[in-house]
Amino acid sequence: MRRCDPEGCLTRVVEQFTTGDRIKIVSGAFAEFVTTVEHIDPDRRLHVLLDLLGRQTKVQVDPSMAILHR
């Protein structure tokens, strides 16, 4: 689903996430990773754990960079 910003340009609607949701990161350095939301900051940043180089690493993800994984 898309909407227009004040200048009339299309913008992506950010999904609402909750702790425990399975998400797929769709842009940025971690695109294509599928993970679970561990925590959500008051400013809506998602905290997730990614398996990087064989270690679990905590990463913050902007919600506009993720979609619910079905």
Image: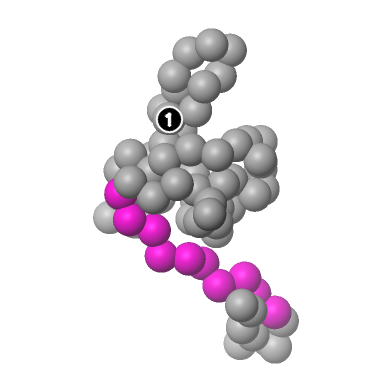
Task: Kindly identify the residue that appears in the image at 53 percent across and 11 percent down.
Answer: 54
Q: Is residue 34 left or right of residue 9?
A: left
Is residue 2 on the magenta stretch? no
Q: Kindly state the secondary structure of the residue where label 1 is placed.
A: strand
Q: Residue furthest right?
A: 9
Q: Is residue 18 left or right of residue 5?
A: left
Q: Residue furthest top?
A: 54
Task: Kindly identify the residue that appears in the image at 43 percent across and 30 percent down.
Answer: 49
Question: What scheme was used to colour the molecule?
Answer: one colour
Under mark 1, the amino acid is Leu
Q: Residue 51: percent from the left, percent from the top?
A: 52, 22
Of 35 and 61, the residue lying toward us: 35
Residue 16 quadrant: bottom left
- Main SS category, magenta section: loop
Of 10 and 54, the residue lying toward us: 54
Q: Residue 4: percent from the left, percent from the top?
A: 64, 85
Q: Residue 20: percent from the left, percent from the top?
A: 33, 46
Can residue 46 be seen?
A: no
Q: Is residue 40 left or right of residue 28?
A: left
Which quadrant holds the N terminus? bottom right
Is residue 17 on the magenta stretch? yes
Can residue 33 be seen?
A: yes
**Above or below, comparing residue 2 to residue 18 in the picture:** below
Residue 43 quadrant: bottom left
Q: Which residues are magenta?
A: 10-19
Task: Kindly identify the residue that appears in the image at 58 percent across and 12 percent down.
Answer: 53
Of 24 and 28, the residue lying toward us: 24
Q: Residue 5: percent from the left, percent from the top?
A: 62, 83
Task: Kindly identify the residue that appears in the image at 70 percent across and 88 percent down.
Answer: 8
* Residue of label 1: 49
- Label 1: how many Cα within 10 Å (few below 14, some 14–19, many 20+): some
Q: Residue furthest front?
A: 70
